[in-house]
């Protein structure tokens, strides 16, 4: 917040004109220390985003989120529907981490890491500056009649934007269906791979619509994270903030005058040049305090520092700071609220890591056939079961069989005793377990079953074995 009178605060949305129609923003091309840092971070993240789906670890795609087939690869580890509990825990970890990160550092994620911001500001917007020019040139071109120059620039820009959107859609599809399926679609063509090709066109259209027309409205209207910041932020959260104490002082803002001692006149350091507004990709005035649209992109920091340096005033009028640091000169403190979120995050991470270590590459489930009781076969008691074995790895198991562990008896598989489970495959069937009646201590005995590939024990599971209620 600021100490300005109420009438100085905005009462309109920067992207809507007085008639209620969409008003396009033409931000000034940013430059400066933070912008250079953001470019490095953005291009590193873009490289990771584009390379990830084509990296394989032990035959597994490094990152894949195949929702339709319910198959996920994270850092090369495959996760199946049976591992859904891990996915839930990881989502909870992500949510708590974002909450903690926002409480401490505000919306730094939006300005530095969010794919929407990176693509818009570091890819599409930079191409737009190259073709249409800076803020003034873009504004004039928008008002200009459709002559040869405008048609040439628009066609060139929209064509490049479409090609980039098509490329992003291919990468997005590689994450969803796998890079192998993407290469197969390229090899076989759109006719044989109609479903994937239609999905590709839909994704291309969505990305093209977002980056050509919808743009910052994604952050204002569609993204729920921006709405959450009003709940998550407090006076101790670090944000891109305007130092209203220094900027306004006793007399408020005033235009710059040469050889004027602003300290003696009581005027604030803000010279009301509006450059922080012109450079803002969201079209807001950071001097009005924390606002929903602000993505903490730091463009206003760089621009204000340029202006302060040019007029001989100290930099940092707009900077990363908390409300309490500006108003009360209080240094940052790790509050009880932050400690609470940290504790929850640590607990969830501990649970997640523990579950990862307990997770097996092969999952076996053996269940008694519903409605079936035990059978007498001489001195032996027999129970019938169904089994399901899930191979989560990228290698075939060619010699799978069952054996009882810690219990004398025999397992008879219906069909071949030894069978194969293909990579990322599932094998299901029926088996019988036979145990001598004299070895049963009650009418319900817990039996442990080992799943072997050759002589290697790859998984264990347990089930109940039913017998007669009385024994001789």
Image (tube, rainbow, N blue to C red):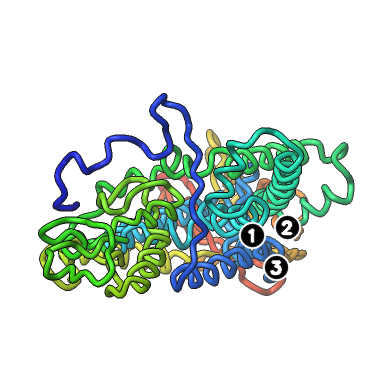
Q: Is residue 169 above or below residue 454?
A: above
Residue 142's spot in the image, x, y percent? 59, 39
Cα distance in 3D space between marks 2 and 1: 10 Å
| Residue of label 1 | 392
| Residue of label 2 | 421
Cα distance in 3D space between marks 2 and 3: 22 Å
Task: Name the one closer to the observer, 71 or 111.
Answer: 111
Rendered image: mark on residue 419: none
Q: Is residue 449 visible?
A: yes
Q: Residues within 10 Å of mark 2 (few under 14, many from 20)?
A: many
The residue lying at 39 percent from left, 40 percent from top is 14
Mark positioned earlier in the residue sequence (2 or 3):
3
Residue 166's spot in the image, x, y percent? 72, 47
Q: Residues within 10 Å of mark 1 (few under 14, many from 20)?
A: many
Question: SS of the residue at dot 1?
Answer: loop
Q: Is residue 273 above or below residue 221?
A: below
| Residue of label 3 | 56
Mark positioned earlier in the residue sequence (2 or 1):
1
The residue lying at 57 percent from left, 57 percent from top is 79
């Amino acid at each position: 917040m600021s100490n300005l009178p109420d009438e100085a605060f905005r009462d309109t949305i920067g992207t809507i004109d007085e008639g209620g129609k969409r008003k396009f923003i033409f931000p000034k091309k940013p430059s400066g220390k933070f912008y250079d840092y953001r470019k490095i971070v953005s291009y590193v993240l873009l490289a990771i985003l584009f390379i990830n789906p084509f990296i394989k670890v032990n035959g597994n795609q490094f990152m894949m989120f195949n929702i339709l087939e319910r198959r996920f690869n994270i850092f090369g580890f495959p996760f199946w529907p049976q591992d859904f509990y891990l996915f839930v825990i990881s989502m909870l970890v992500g949510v708590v981490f974002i909450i903690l990160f926002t409480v401490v550092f505000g919306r730094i994620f939006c300005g530095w890491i969010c794919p929407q911001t990176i693509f818009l500001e570091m890819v599409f917007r930079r191409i737009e500056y190259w073709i249409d020019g800076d803020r003034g040139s873009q504004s004039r071109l928008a008002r200009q009649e459709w002559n040869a120059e405008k048609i040439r620039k628009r066609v060139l820009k929209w064509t490049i934007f479409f090609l980039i959107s098509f490329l992003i859609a291919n990468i997005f599809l590689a994450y969803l269906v796998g890079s192998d399926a993407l290469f197969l679609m390229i090899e076989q063509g759109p006719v044989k791979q109609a479903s994937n090709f239609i999905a590709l066109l839909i994704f291309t259209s969505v990305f093209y619509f977002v980056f050509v027309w919808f743009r910052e409205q994604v952050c204002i209207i569609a993204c729920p994270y921006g709405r959450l910041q009003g709940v998550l932020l407090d006076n101790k959260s670090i944000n891109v903030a305007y130092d209203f104490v220094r900027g306004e002082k006793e007399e408020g803002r005033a235009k710059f005058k040469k050889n004027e001692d602003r300290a003696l006149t009581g005027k604030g350091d803000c010279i009301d040049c509006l450059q922080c507004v012109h450079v803002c990709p969201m079209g807001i005035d950071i001097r009005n305090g924390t606002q929903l649209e602000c993505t903490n992109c730091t463009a206003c920091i760089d621009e204000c520092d340029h202006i302060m340096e040019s007029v001989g005033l100290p930099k940092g009028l707009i900077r990363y700071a908390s409300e309490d640091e500006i108003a009360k000169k209080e240094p940052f403190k790790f509050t009880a609220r932050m400690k609470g979120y940290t504790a929850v995050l640590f607990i969830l991470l501990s649970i997640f890591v523990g579950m990862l270590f307990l997770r097996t590459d092969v999952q076996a489930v053996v269940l008694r056939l519903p409605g079936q009781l035990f059978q007498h076969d001489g001195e032996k008691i027999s129970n019938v079961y169904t089994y399901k074995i899930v191979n989560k790895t990228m290698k075939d198991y060619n010699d799978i069989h069952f054996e009882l562990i810690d219990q004398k008896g025999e397992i008879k598989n219906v069909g071949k005793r030894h069978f194969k489970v293909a990579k990322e495959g599932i094998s299901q069937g029926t088996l019988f377990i036979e145990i001598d009646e004299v070895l049963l201590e009650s009418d319900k005995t817990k039996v442990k079953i080992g799943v072997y590939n050759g002589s290697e024990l790859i998984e264990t599971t347990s089930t109940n074995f039913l017998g007669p209620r009385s024994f001789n």
